[in-house]
């Protein structure tokens, strides 16, 4: 019987795997951390040593209060400056009091400090840069997101954390980046517990605006639980509920949309760990060509290779679980746009 089951599994994979590639881009079409249409030109210009487009991009987000975009763009520009910083040095020299350059400088300094074995000591020296960024743009929540990351690395007390959190939410109550930074501080790997992490994430998701990525916080809490280990166990129902909420959020965005790409990549990882293979395959189709370093860089030095390998693995798992032949009576009835069974002439 064991041999027969193995044979049937092989036949199912052979018959089903190719059909499951429908809706998935080829491997060579998948991009890692692809910038959007606004950030891309700024990065290209920075690669040529020109800081003007980056400065214009960030000033636009500040003047228009596009805090989510401002946070993303600041993070990506600082990451680029880590390896190729000449353009940023020129920017700082030409405009030493530019609030947008000050924001990138603070983010860059925090990133550099986190990479050092002397992290805590170096981070303490970065404090004045974060303060300068906050003073340069008083309405901006992004310096306070940086401050929350900074607090995690400097062993800040819960009281200090709560003071920073109050400043962040006063500027933008539903800012995703600030919520992620707070969630990390409260995780079991740092200064909280799995219970605190989930409680915070679920409350924030419940209060979030429609379509807000804050609704993905519980699945980030699930990721932390699944990857960090230790501490009290979290009920499977709570993990599934977090995944279900993120699935509903993902469905609100168009397929192959770069904006929710990181959330969809993270959700896919969690679904795989929960062995929800069909749901994971559906998220792969929604991801399209937009792979993101996180979360795959947490499990591999080659995040793109890990994503592509897992993508194949998910297809094989789904194929192996599907029957060899589907009977007509087993097929679900098609649904009309009103939710009921469709009549034969309904298109």
Image: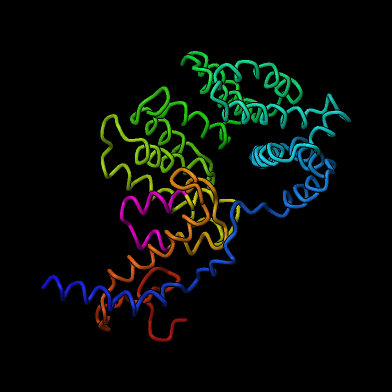
Q: Check the image and report above or below for 314 versus 73.
A: below
Name, please, the residue furthest toward the front.
117
Q: Residue at x 64, y 54 (%)?
A: 34
In the image, 301 versus 105, the foreground residue is 301
Name, please, the residue furthest toward the bottom.
345
Q: Residue at x 28, y 37 (%)?
A: 234
Q: Position of residue 149 (x, y in %)?
A: 56, 27
In the image, 282 versus 128, the foreground residue is 128
Q: Position of residue 266 (x, y in %)?
A: 46, 48
**Left or right: where does residue 279 sit relative to residue 37?**
left
Q: Check the image and report above or below for 101 versus 307.
A: above
Name, please, the residue furthest toward the right.
94
In the image, 133 versus 170, the foreground residue is 133
- Name the quarter where the N terminus is drawn: bottom left
Range shown magenta: 266-281
Q: Residue at x 66, y 30 (%)?
A: 107
**Residue 194 included in the magenta stretch of the image:** no
**Number of callouts:** 0
Q: Residue at x 45, y 71 (%)?
A: 337
**Left or right: where does residue 235 sit relative to residue 89?**
left
Q: Position of residue 260 (x, y in %)?
A: 55, 51
Q: Check the image and report above or below for 261 versus 156.
A: below
Q: Position of residue 142 (x, y in %)?
A: 65, 30
**Residue 276 included in the magenta stretch of the image:** yes
**Residue 336 location, quadrant:** bottom left
Q: How is the image coloured?
A: rainbow
**Left or right: where does residue 100 sit relative to residue 196?**
right
Q: Main secondary structure of the magenta part?
A: helix
């Amino acid at each position: 019987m064991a041999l027969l089951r193995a044979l049937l599994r092989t036949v199912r994979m052979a018959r089903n795997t190719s059909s499951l590639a429908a809706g998935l881009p080829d491997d060579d079409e998948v991009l890692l951390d692809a910038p959007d249409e606004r950030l891309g030109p700024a990065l290209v210009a920075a690669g040529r040593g020109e800081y003007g487009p980056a400065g214009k991009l960030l000033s636009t987000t500040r003047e228009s209060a596009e805090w989510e975009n401002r946070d993303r763009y600041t993070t990506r520009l600082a990451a680029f400056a880590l390896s190729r910083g000449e353009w940023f040095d020129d920017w700082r020299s030409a405009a030493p009091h530019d609030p947008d350059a000050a924001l990138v400088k603070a983010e860059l300094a925090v990133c550099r400090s986190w990479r050092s074995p002397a992290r805590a000591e170096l981070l303490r020296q970065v404090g004045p840069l974060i303060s300068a960024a906050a003073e340069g743009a008083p309405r901006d929540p992004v310096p306070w997101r940086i401050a929350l990351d900074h607090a995690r690395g400097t062993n800040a007390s819960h009281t200090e954390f709560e003071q920073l959190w109050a400043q962040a939410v006063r500027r933008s109550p539903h800012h995703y980046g600030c919520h992620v930074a707070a969630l990390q501080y409260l995780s079991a790997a740092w200064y909280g517990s799995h219970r605190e992490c989930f409680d915070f994430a679920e409350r924030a998701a419940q209060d979030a605006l429609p379509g807000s990525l804050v609704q993905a916080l519980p699945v980030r809490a699930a990721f932390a639980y699944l990857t960090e280990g230790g501490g009290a166990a979290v009920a499977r129902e709570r993990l599934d509920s977090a995944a279900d909420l993120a699935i509903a959020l993902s469905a609100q965005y168009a397929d192959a949309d770069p904006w929710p790409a990181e959330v969809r990549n993270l959700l896919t990882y969690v679904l795989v760990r929960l062995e929800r293979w069909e749901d994971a395959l559906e998220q792969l189709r929604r991801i399209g060509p937009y792979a993101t370093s996180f979360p795959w860089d947490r499990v591999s030095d080659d995040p793109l290779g890990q994503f592509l390998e897992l993508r194949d693995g998910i297809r094989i798992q789904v194929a192996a679980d599907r029957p060899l032949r589907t009977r007509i009576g087993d097929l679900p009835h098609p649904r009309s746009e009103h939710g009921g069974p469709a009549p034969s002439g309904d298109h």
